[in-house]
Amino acid sequence: MDDRATHTSKALRLALVALTIATALPAAAQTPARSTQNLPPFDAAAQSALTPAPSPIEWQYGAFIDVGRLFSSTSPSNHLFRNRGTTPRVDEWNVNMTAAYLKKAPSESSRAGVELTIQEGRDSEIFGFSATAPNIGGADWLLHLGPTNVSYLAPVGKGLTVQGGIFSSLIGYDGLYAKDNVTYTRPWTGDYTPYFMLGVNASSPVTARLTATGFFVNGYWHLAHANNVPSVGGQLAYKATDRVTVKETVLYGPHQSDTALRYWRLFSDSIVERKTGVVTAAFEYQIGTEGVATAGDPQALWMAAQAPVQWVVGGPWSIVARPEFAWDRDGRWIGAEQSVKAFTATVEYRRPLGRAQAIVKLEYRVDDSRGPGGGFFTEPDVRPGVPGLTRKQHLVGVGLIFTFDGTVRQ
């Protein structure tokens, strides 16, 4: 492991030690606003009955490590899963992600919130960058930050939560961390939409079933700097029934140096999820378009969809099937004109170990890429150091994940 990874690992160990020590500290005693020791017994009892006990303030902390390997049918000499930002390497063991976090959610009793996350691993190296725009200033250290932000719950309407900093993306069904997803490898809908956003968002429940969120972010990719104009967007999340949730998210803004309105990117992400006890089924559909500031002003188009289904077989065991497709007609998202069809099947085992949890994911996936810029790296090399290309790739993967989470109440 290189020096950067070594230094980060040391920081993670120190953070875990500090957090472990914190759990052993007794919760701070609550000091009443005024003493009642000189009041008559009946007055003290009456005051106690009339004054509700303050809600405890909860700090959550934790860490995890994710080690995995993808065995490929193509065996490329460069060990790369072409055009992928997560689980990017094949035929070798990698620490794909390790992270530690500390957070406090805002509440009515303590309206300020905070979230701090540090991360390191293969999955953190290129996921937030753009193939068509320069990097943001400080990107070399910002890539080591996961969700890191401050928030505030304002007493407005049914409660208005404002959050600023790096936060989990409002676009997409899958997250950056494999421990939170139904499969080990991410879908194409995940790797070509943002996992994190950098900016400000505000959300509020409109009704008991509908929540609205608006946001301003620095751009489509949080570690890229295409221009100085922010992107804007919004999300409606509707709980249609106790089992069905529908989300619609729209992002609008420029992702090129030319910020004329005709070149702004318009992106829509639609998700429907249904949970019925042991089965969770979802469908996600994305469509994005933008005018390209080049000769002829062509209109670029992206479409992608996935339909994962998870079945908890029993106890710690579950199985997942996920068909998907992605079409980058003009190469503005993947970087090359192509269409991809893929299928993933996963067997997952989760075993609680006190505050910790061990997760094992065994996975098979096949990807078929067509088009002028399609294909996956394969052997033999067409010339030294340059792998050939093939339209189909089979992968058998294993992910070994260990998590630790805890709570401190004050």
Image (spheres, helix red, strand yellow):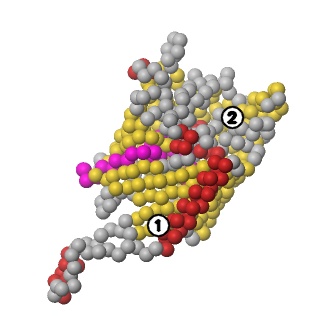
Q: Position of residue 79 (x, y in %)?
A: 75, 39
Q: Nearer the viewer, residue 271 or 299?
A: 299
Q: Earlier in the sequence, mark 1 or mark 2?
A: 2
Left or right of 9, for residue 217:
left
Residue at x 53% of width, y 28% of height:
133
Residue at x 55% of width, y 44% of height:
141
Q: Nearer the viewer, residue 207 or 75?
A: 75
Q: Amino acid at mark 2?
A: Arg
Q: Position of residue 75 (x, y in %)?
A: 79, 39
Badge nearest the viewer, 1 or 2: 1
- Residue 13, by quadrant, is bottom right
Q: CA distance from mark 1 to mark 2?
A: 40 Å
Observer able to see residue 159 = yes
Residue at x 56% of width, y 66% of height:
17
Q: Which residue is mark 2?
A: 82
Q: Position of residue 403 (x, y in %)?
A: 59, 61
Query: Up-down: is 227 above or below 320?
Result: above
Most extreme residue toward the bottom is: 41
Left or right of 376, for residue 309:
left
Q: Position of residue 377 (x, y in %)?
A: 74, 33
Stretch of the chain drawn in magenta: 155-180
Q: Which residue is mark 1?
A: 407
Q: Amino acid at mark 1?
A: Thr
